[in-house]
Image (spheres, grey):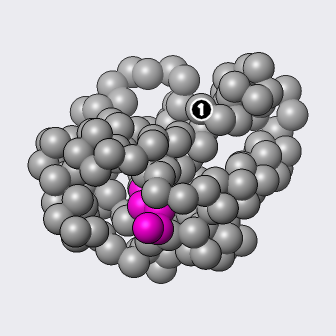
Amino acid sequence: MNNIILCGFMGSGKTVVGKELSKIMGRRFIDTDEMIEKEQGIAIKAIFAVRGEDYFRDLEHDVCKRVSQMKNCVISTGGGALTFERNAKVLRKGGKIVFLDASFETICDRIGSNNNRPLFEDREKAKLLYDERKEKYLAAADYVVDGDLSARKAALDIAQMFK
């Protein structure tokens, strides 16, 4: 069975929905951002600060290539991963991409004042980034799910799609 790959803006629920979906479907859960942090031994925010975004994006692409070869997983990607065609291309080889389409208002409520989001420190810039990325998520996605739903409801909706 193919992987189910979740994409969407930071705070759209990829990790929470992904963990719930993996329980419902009896699949392994993988978070690409967590993989990067574990392998690098530092937080993504620190990678951005010390090595820069280009370095992080190369790490992210390498992880996307590796997870695309796994089987029967629920994969949560970083907020920017599927805005790069090279990542969408390799991930499509290993599964179907589901875009969790959450409103910017919902995302702001979920993130609150979390300072571990390097691209969300300025809300106005974050909104511009959200608008820019949404088109890319839609272009990458095989399916779109309402990201404003509860994690349980979104996971159940996705599970139904893959029955």
The one nearer the camera, 59 or 22, is 22
Percent coordinates x, y for residue 63 in the rendering: 71, 50
Residue 126 visible somewhere in the drawing: no
Q: Secondary structure at mark 1?
A: helix
For the point 35% across and 38% down, the residue is 19
Q: Is residue 69 above or below residue 104?
A: below
Percent coordinates x, y for residue 14 in the rendering: 39, 46
Is residue 103 highlighted in magenta? no
- Callout 1, which amino acid? Glu
Percent coordinates x, y for residue 129 in the rendering: 51, 55
For the point 28% across and 50% down, the residue is 25
Magenta span: predominant SS is strand
Q: Is residue 53 above or below residue 156?
A: above
Is 8 situated left or right of 105 in this image? Answer: right
Q: Quadrant of the C terminus?
A: bottom left
Is 40 situated left or right of 162 in this image? Answer: right
The one nearer the camera, 128 or 110, is 110
Q: Quadrant of residue 45?
A: top right
Is 1 situated left or right of 79 in this image? Answer: left
For the point 54% across and 31% down, the residue is 117
Highlighted magenta segment, given as a residue range = 1-7
Label 1 packing within 10 angstroms: few (<14), some (14-19), many (20+): some
Residue 32 visible somewhere in the drawing: yes
Is residue 2 highlighted in magenta? yes
Q: Is residue 2 above or below residue 75?
A: below
For the point 82% across and 39% down, the residue is 52
Q: Quadrant of the N terminus?
A: bottom left
Percent coordinates x, y for residue 98 in the rendering: 38, 65
For disc 1, the marked residue is 34
The one nearer the camera, 99 or 4, is 4
